[in-house]
Amino acid sequence: MSSIIGFIRRILTGLNPPVSVPTPESGPLNFGILGAATIAPIAIVTPAKNHEETIIYAVAARDKAKATAFAKKYDIEKAYGGPNGYQELIDDPEIDAIYNPLPNGLHYEWTMKALAAGKHVLLEKPSADTAEETRQMFDFAEKKGLVLLEAFHYRFHPAIQRVKAIIDSKELGAIKHISASLAIPKGMGPKTSDIRYNFTLGGGSLMDMGCYTLNVIRYLSSSNPTSVISAEHSIFTPVNSPASFKPNIDRGTTAMLALPNNATASLKCDLAMPLKYGFIPPMPLVNATITLEGGEIEIYNFVMPTLYHSIKVTTKDANKKIKTTVEKVYTFADGKMEGKGEAWWTTYRFQLEAFVDRIKGRTPQTWVDREDSIANMHWIEQIYAKV
């Protein structure tokens, strides 16, 4: 019963957190949002309500009416729209930082424009279409003395950090294999008209969901792959597609990677897993499993752990007796680690804390640095190139 009550409390408070009213003394940062995207409320608007140093000051959309409606709904002071709306928001001298959740294919262009205007940028993943674009963005941010962060929000939550702490302690020995999956059944995922199925906008399952699976493999192993052993893509083809249709988007991808020290890794991502027997949806996959010399760690729901997650550690003693322990780490204190936060803090709220800390010159609890972002995009390209 207590777990159910805790679940309800986390969800309700996370979606409607206590409001922290910024004061002049706190020196709040004014954020502008590029695009009235579906992800924006959970990723930046709601977390900002609870941070005394942040104000969601403006939003821009191609459609001015959409921007105005979004601003009204979320009590945002300014709305920009029309063909010049994005640039007008970026040029607003009152704005300190930009949240960029635009389609992947627009990340590079508008992040570079935001940096050119002297704005810090919180950039949705994946960072860009290519590793070279990612490198150029970080080079420019460093040249301008600005903060640029790729929004791998799950990395800021204590749950995944607890898993890494267990691995890094070496109590279970060296890593032998890591598998990571993020896949949803057909009907739960995006519609066929969604930007994630649009090649020119940087769509694809590996870009959208696979970037998480690749990132968690690299993060937990503290390494980059040494090679792509194999890769297979399930190509997206809409029903009744015209003869002119070009099949160039992966609906799903699986890959096997070689890691240092003879370890391996596998990833699976899918925007629309086929229904079993044509009508039974498979269970969503949101887990990572780490096989080590002395046991196994499985984290369920590493992407959105505030909703619910579990960390299961299985070991064998000298008599081959199996021992299993299960942890739930909603706060850093739960995992005997140092860090701020409440059990209802979403991954995005933890991320915002770190982003503001870095802008304010404080040391964030953790960070996703430039080399991490560049490497993640590089290995996405290598997986695509394998086929």
Image (tube, grey):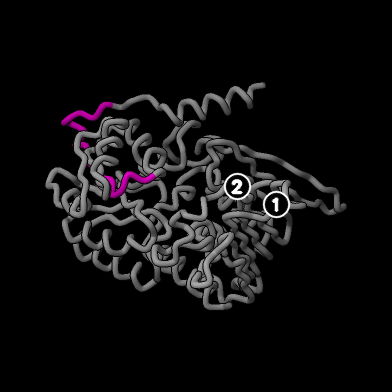
Going from the N terminus, do you reach mark 1 or mark 2 first?
Answer: 2
* Label number found at residue 248: none
* Image x and y of residue 31, in percent: 25, 43
Q: Position of residue 136 (x, y in %)?
A: 29, 70
Looking at the picture, which amino acid does disc 2 mark? Answer: Gly
| Residue sitting at x 37%, y 24% | 18
Asked whether residue 23 is drawn in magenta, I would say yes
- Which contiguous range is marked in magenta? 21-37
Label 2 residue SS:
loop
* Residue at 37% over, 63% down: 105
**Residue position marked by numbered label 1 in the rendering:** 275
Q: Is residue 190 magenta?
A: no
Residue with the mark numbered 2: 187
At mark 1, the secondary structure is: loop
Q: Position of residue 373 (x, y in %)?
A: 41, 63
Residue type highlighted by circle 1: Leu
Cα distance between the residues tagged 1 and 2: 9 Å
What's the residue at 36%, 51% (across, down)? 101
Q: Number of callouts in the render? A: 2
The answer to whether the residues at label 1 and label 2 have Cβ atoms under 8 Å apart is yes
The crowd level at tag 1 (other Cα within 10 Å; few <14, some 14-19, many 20+) is some
- Left or right of residue 266: residue 144: left
* Residue 361 showing in the rendered view: no
Is residue 238 visible in the rendered structure shown here?
yes
Name the foreground residue: 33 vs 116: 33
Q: Residues within 10 Å of mark 2 (few under 14, many from 20)?
A: few
Q: Residue at x 76, y 51 (%)?
A: 315
